[in-house]
Image (spheres, rainbow, N blue to C red):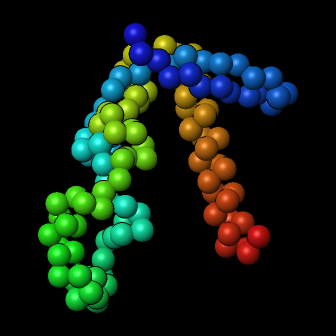
Amino acid sequence: MNTINLTIEDDDGYETEIHLPAHYIVCPRCEGNGTHNHPDIGGNGFTSSEWDECCAGDPDFPEEYFRGTYDVQCTECKGARVILDVDEDRFTDIQRKAWEDHCQHLFEMHQERRYQERMGF
């Protein structure tokens, strides 16, 4: 059985490792291709003016781009095309509570970080 290990810390700083059931899913980063666009070359897409600039400077660029010449190995799955993901359908009550607490903790950390960014910290 596949598992993902989750280390949780209680209010006293005591750490406990929980083993969560897991299953493989298609990698959401590369959508199962094992590669994705290089982040420095259209990683977030192109504006029309950026695309025109790239194509004007290199007439072979469009063909090479769509062929995947500039792709890199997926940073999420390392080319495996799948990743382990928790299988919440197989959680015990204790695992579900630990997972919910963990997710709540991550959400609160994210909210705090966003607040600090807004405040200029």
> Is residue 20 in sight in this rendering?
yes
**Position in image of residue 115 (x %, y %):** 68, 65
What residue do we see at 22% from left, 89% from top? 56
Give the side of residue 14 with respect to residue 74, left or right: right
**Position in image of residue 110 (x %, y %):** 62, 54
Please identify the residue farthest to the top as the structure is shown: 1
**Position in image of residue 29 (x %, y %):** 35, 48
What residue do we see at 60% from left, 18% from top? 18
Please identify the residue farthest to the right as the structure is shown: 12
What residue do we see at 25% from left, 41% from top? 32
> Is residue 97 in sight in this rendering?
no
Front residue of this view, candidates 70 and 2: 70
* Residue 53 falls in image quadrant: bottom left
The correct choice, above or below, for 8 with respect to 3 in the image is below
Front residue of this view, candidates 86 and 83: 83
Report how many numbered discs are placed on residues in the image.
0
Front residue of this view, candidates 59 and 115: 59
* Residue 111 falls in image quadrant: bottom right
Give the side of residue 115 with respect to residue 121, left or right: left
What residue do we see at 85% from left, 27% from top? 12
The correct choice, above or below, for 107 with respect to 18 in the image is below
**Position in image of residue 31 (x %, y %):** 26, 46
